[in-house]
Image (cartoon, rainbow, N blue to C red):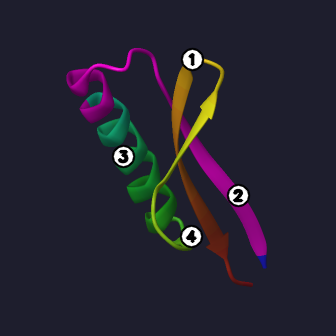
C-alpha cells in the first residue's frame, strides 16, 4: 500500500482564499482518485506559524 498527503497552503485567513485552497485540494484529490488513489479520512486543517494548510491523506492499494 502506498500513502501520501495532499497539502494546499491557505495564503490568507480570508474566506475567499480558504475556498480557493479547498477547490485546489479537491482538484488534486480528483486527479489522484482517477489514478487509483483513495481518500483516507476527511480533510484536516493544520497551522505552521501564521500559515494555514488543508491536508488530505490518500492511499493506493496494490
Distance between mark 2 and mark 1 Cα atoms: 24 Å
10 Å crowding of disc 4: few (<14), some (14-19), many (20+): some
Numbered mark located on residue 26 in the image = none
| Residue pointed to by mark 2 | 4
Label 2 or label 3, whichever comes before in sequence order: 2
Q: What is the residue that sits farthest to the left in this orientation?
A: 16
**Residue 22 in the figure: left or right of residue 7:** left
| Front label number (4 vs 2) | 2
Q: Is residue 40 above or below residue 19?
A: below
Q: Which residue is mark 3?
A: 27
Of callouts 1 and 3, the N-terminal one: 3
Please report contact status of discs 4 and 2: CB closer than 8 Å, yes or no: yes
Q: Quadrant of the N terminus?
A: bottom right
Cα separation, mark 4 vs mark 2, equals 9 Å
The residue stretch that appears in magenta: 2-19
Identify the disc placed on residue 37. 4
Amino acid at each position: 500500500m502506498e500513502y501520501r498527503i495532499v497539502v494546499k497552503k491557505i495564503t490568507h485567513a480570508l474566506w475567499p482564499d480558504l475556498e480557493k485552497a479547498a477547490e485546489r485540494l479537491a482538484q488534486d484529490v480528483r486527479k489522484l482518485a482517477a489514478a487509483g488513489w483513495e481518500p483516507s479520512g476527511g480533510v484536516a486543517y493544520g497551522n505552521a506559524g501564521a500559515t494555514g494548510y488543508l491536508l488530505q491523506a490518500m492511499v493506493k492499494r496494490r
